[in-house]
Image: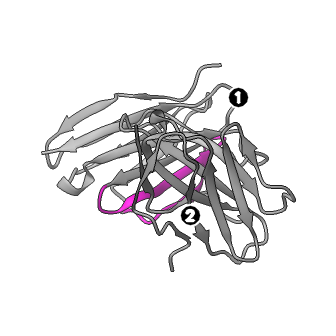
Amino acid sequence: AQKITQTQPGMFVQEKEAVTLDCTYDTSDPSYGLFWYKQPSSGEMIFLIYQGSYDQQNATEGRYSLNFQKARKSANLVISASQLGDSAMYFCAMRERSNYQLIWGAGTKLIIKP
Amino acid sequence: KAGVTQTPRYLIKTRGQQVTLSCSPISGHRSVSWYQQTPGQGLQFLFEYFSETQRNKGNFPGRFSGRQFSNSRSEMNVSTLELGDSALYLCASSQGDSSYEQYFGPGTRLTVT
């Protein structure tokens, strides 16, 4: 069964606009963590933001915020004021307490237009 | 603090050969995980080592193996290479039990011809 679903294979966004990248997940483990990573064309996986299942508030890191809706099992990434350098693949991933591996979504290719 | 390093960055091998990839985690990190990334299969977990012990293993054939040394550096080995093993191999380190965050190296791009 698909544990992490990213429904947007690709997105085009105008520079300076906000963008929301969707991610839904499925787990029966009450303790888990959700991650977003950015992968530029160079290939390196860059950690962006983390949300724990017991965290009461949505995580924020600079221009990145995570819209965590636990009941809906949704963990969308919001990038405010997009920049040309934000063009990359974005991956949502989950790690369950009972498991040591990251489970990945298929990714969303984000292209920022000038 | 230095990040995760992986060597070599690029590698070309022929079918049937074997290859060893190396990963040095962030200083103080005791957990090292390996992932394979291909256009067709996406990102898949290979295995994770913590304090020289394999804690978890993904669904890969026995040709894929790994180990971790006492200084937390890790190696993964692929024997009898197949064309389908061509991929970006990513290594990630984390502190271990108490930390969920994983930090990735630049990857090793393996091409099998």
> Can residue B102 be seen from the camera position used here?
no
Which structural element holds mark 1? Answer: loop
Instruction: State the colouring used for the structure image.
Output: one colour
Number of numbered discs: 2
Determine which quarter of the picture holds residue B18: top left
The secondary element bearing badge 2 is classed as loop
Furthest residue to the top?
Answer: B1
* Residue type beneath disc 1: Gly
Q: Is residue A26 toward the left or the right of residue B110 in the image?
A: right
The disc placed on residue A64 is none
Q: How crowded is mark 1: few (under 14 residues within 10 Å), some or many (20 or more)?
A: few
Assign the C terminus of chain A to one quadrant of the image.
Answer: top left
Residue at 56% across / 33% down in the picture?
Answer: B69
Q: Position of residue B59 (x, y in %)?
A: 44, 66
Q: Does the magenta stretch include residue B47?
A: yes
- When the figure is inspected, residue B89 is found, relative to residue A9, above or below; the finding is above
**Given the image, what chain letter belongs to the residue carrying mark 1?**
B
Q: Where is residue B2 in the image (x, y as percent from the top left)?
A: 59, 20
A32 inside magenta stretch: no
Category of crowding for the residue at label 2, using alpha-carbon neighbours closer than 10 angstroms: few (below 14), some (14–19), many (at least 20)? some
Q: Name the residue under label 1.
A: B28
Q: List the residue tagged with mark 2.
A: A22
A84 or A23, which is in the foreground? A84
Q: Viewer-proximal residue, B54 or A112?
A: A112
Could you tell me if the residues under marks 2 and 1 are in contact, i.e. CB atoms within 8 Å? no
* A94 on left or right of A8: right
Q: Give the range drawn in magenta.
A: B39-60
Q: Mark 2 lies on which chain?
A: A
Distance of label 2 from label 1 (alpha carbons): 34 Å
* Amino acid type at image mark 2: Asp
Q: Does the image show residue A41? A: yes
x and y, in percent, of residue A85 in the image: 46, 33
